[in-house]
Amino acid sequence: MGISQYIKEIGRGQRGAKPLTREQAADLLGQVLDGSVTDLEIGAFCLAMRIKGETAEEMCGFLDAVHTRISKLPATDTPTVVLPSYNGARKLPVLTPLLALLLARKGLPVLLHGMRTEARRVLASDVLVALDIPALAAPEKIAPGQVAHITTEKLHPGLARLLAVRQVVGLRNPGHSVVKLMNPCAGPAVVVSAYTHPEYLDMLRATFGTLGMTALLSRGLEGEVATDPRRTPRYDGFVHGTYHLLEEQQPGTAPEVPGLPTEIDVATTATYTRQVLDGALPVPDALQRQVEHILRLAAQTPATTAETQP
């Protein structure tokens, strides 16, 4: 039947558009992911949602569609920390690989997933490859203390195709929000997510709460989940959907971060990451606080307790 009936509802502009129910949103995105709609319909869906914006109920439906279709990584003995990475570095080095390796050092399995959505940015996955951590060829179990990374296409080719629409129309779409919220693991996980615009905060809180997920939410750095090393943001935590304010935003910006390079290329970022891990340079205080918050959330997420997901 296609998705034209949904486009009629969401495509009437900011004032005239009607929100979809969770079931409708799941059906709509499911058809997009399955490749059963035309390119024209996909483009119309992406543009209409960009103008309208997603509600929490729609986002839950979109995640329902994704969680029932993606190839999930097997459950681990301890909660997996999930780090979505889709933006990369623009002005400051991408610190998501350092965050991943600091968490693995504490004994947690860590998964970074992502793909290129920005043409000229330095990707976290490329830094991990430079650190001799190759991408997974397919989903597999991650050991405690291990960092693994996988491309979105290996999780679901249709989801990767949806993200790639940005290269054609030049605008983000619901897929870019979905990948930063989803749990691609069969077992419990701590999803580390970030937002750029404050108006998304209420929608994200409601989504994590409704789906019963365990997650850490804060302002990101250039779209990445690793915090800005120069400042401490507000941290919102969720344990099986229950909300906790973990830390208020701290005022001020550090004038400098010891050893943080001014260049953002892969080799320089990999070298800086190694130096911090080897103790030659200090862990940025802001990043250390983020690690501590994630560890506390993981400690409250027993491996025997499954996340509430569709």
Image: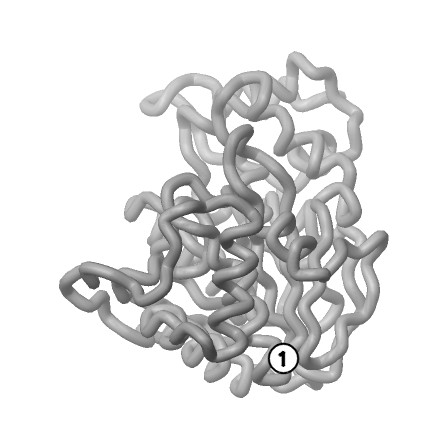
- Name the residue rendered at 36%, 64% in the picture: 259
Residue 109 seen = yes
Observer-nearest of 135 and 241? 135
Tell me which corner region of the image, top left, top right, bottom left or bottom right, holds residue 4: top right
- Name the residue rendered at 79%, 56% in the picture: 136
Observer-nearest of 154 and 30? 154
Observer-nearest of 175 and 230? 230
- Name the residue rendered at 66%, 23% in the picture: 3
Q: Is residue 55 left or right of residue 250?
A: right
x%, y% of residue 123? 57, 45
Circle 1 residues within 10 Å: few <14, some 14–19, many ≥20:
many
Residue 24 seen = no
Above or below: residue 157 compared with residue 51: below
x%, y% of residue 30? 71, 37
Q: How is the image coloured?
A: one colour
Q: Is residue 110 left or right of residue 217?
A: right
x%, y% of residue 28? 65, 33
Above or below: residue 280 compared with residue 100: below
x%, y% of residue 193? 48, 58
Judged from the image, the secondary structure of the residue bearing numbered disc 1 is loop
Q: Is residue 221 left or right of residue 59?
A: left
Tell me which corner region of the image, top left, top right, bottom left or bottom right, holds residue 65: top right
| Residue ID for mark 1 | 108
